[in-house]
Amino acid sequence: MARHEILGGLVQVYKRGGRYWNCSASVDGKQFRSTTKEEELPQAKQAAEDWYLGLRGKARAGLLKTEKTFGETADQFEKEYAIITEGQRSPRWIEGHKIRLKLHLKPFFGNLGLSQVTPGKVQEYRVHRVSTSTTGKAPARSTMHDEIVTLRLVLKTGVRHNWLSHVPDLSPPYRTQGKIVHRPWFSPDEYKQLYTATREQISKALPHFKWNTEQVHDYVLFLANTGLRPDEAKNLQHRDVKVVKDRATGQRILEIDVRGKRGVGFCKSMPGAVQPYERLLARQKPLTGDEKDAIARGGKPEPRFPEPTDPLFPGNHIKLFNNVLLRAKLKVDREGNKRTAYSLRHTYICMRLIEGADIYALAKNCRTSVEMIQKFYAAHIKDLLDTSAINVMRSKRRKRSTKKVDEDRV
């Protein structure tokens, strides 16, 4: 970046690759920036000097209105957001905003006034993020989206406090319609292959691994029959789950109080989730180190079962789950997308769509939107295509015989 100083270093004239030279200066402890609208350096220096003297005159007359910087507005946003959204947003989601501000947004926009956060400056930020990536490749589309969401929330804070007149257009100028990637899920045959593999793993496991393999098997069945996100399942305690008889269908299902990134929500499971949950509730807790020592000395400790405040899935079974996927050759779908525990939620949604579930009720039960389901799931479910509406054939018109035509002419 080309940079020059004038008036003994009081004013800086610089260019960041655009046509015009810009200038910056500090007056009464506040940083100000502006464009000179000049392409040649001598004229830009003269314009910057006139601009600075104008600022000094306004400051002495008390007419200079100091503008809130992006950094100050971001501090105000952090102070308000955690309090206002308490119980509606998970602590992890709130922490994500703070991390994005600290690592990326404040270093780039922090010293700018709110009015200087323009669509062009935001585009410069996107280019900056790609060019300074430490991994050698551009940040993921979702990563950039989350950072722009945080940026927009900060600017909205400025609007609410009358520090900014309006939020500028932050949409990307190019590639606005990104390719929709279908989320990896297990087809009915693949899902059967998966839970068969987890069941076989129990019979083959060594005694000290048996409890973990049983948990993984029930974890697969539970998530695939409830549609919970993995973080929601991790937060779930036994007091959040009730086995009830559904009034509409007469079947036994689970009523679940869900706590996740959407705050507190509710879910009604499929009947297939009841048996795995009852096994979780009846399964003894794993032995502690002291209990193992007592058994080694010939003792017999009392069995311990889950309490209402205990989590359903206390351990981290990611490695065991991934090993099952690898052995069953289910880790990657045909598009090359890697399957994770989140794929069980995708499987639940796709299975319900295949069976003809109402998409609005399904979105409400999964704590998501109809738009998200239509965008990422419904587009690749072949059972949603109505062949009676597609395979329509117009009846063929019968040709009149030549003899009949001649008679008509007579």
Image (cartoon, rainbow, N blue to C red):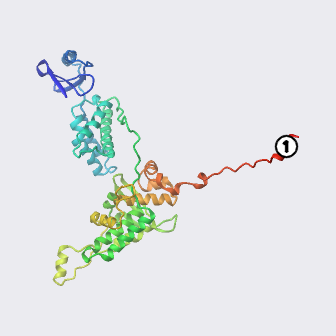
Q: Is residue 254 visible?
A: no
Q: Quadrant of the C terminus?
A: top right
**x, y (%) of residue 284?**
29, 75
Q: Quadrant of residue 242?
A: bottom left
Residue nearer the viewer, 59 or 345:
345
**What residue sits 38% from the left and 63% below the top?**
223
Q: Quadrant of residue 107?
A: top left
Question: What type is the residue that disc 1 sits on?
Answer: Asp
Using the image, determine if residue 165 lies above or below residue 341: above
Q: Residues within 10 Å of mark 1 (few under 14, many from 20)?
A: few
**x, y (%) of residue 372?**
43, 49
**x, y (%) of residue 266?**
40, 57
Residue nearer the viewer, 304 or 293:
293
Q: Is residue 189 left or right of residue 338?
A: right
What is the secondary structure assignment of the residue under circle 1? Answer: helix
Q: Is residue 287 visible?
A: yes
Q: Quadrant of residue 127?
A: top left
Using the image, determine if residue 407 lies above or below residue 67: below
**x, y (%) of residue 221?**
39, 67
Q: Is residue 122 left or right of residue 178?
A: left
| Residue at the bottom extreme of this rendering | 298
Q: Is residue 213 left or right of residue 364?
A: left
Using the image, determine if residue 190 lies above or below residue 99: below
**What residue sits 26% from the left and 76% below the top?**
206
Using the image, determine if residue 283 lies above or below residue 144: below
**What residue sits 21% from the left and 32% below the top?**
111
**What residue sits 31% from the left and 30% below the top?**
120
The residue pinned by badge 1 equals: 406
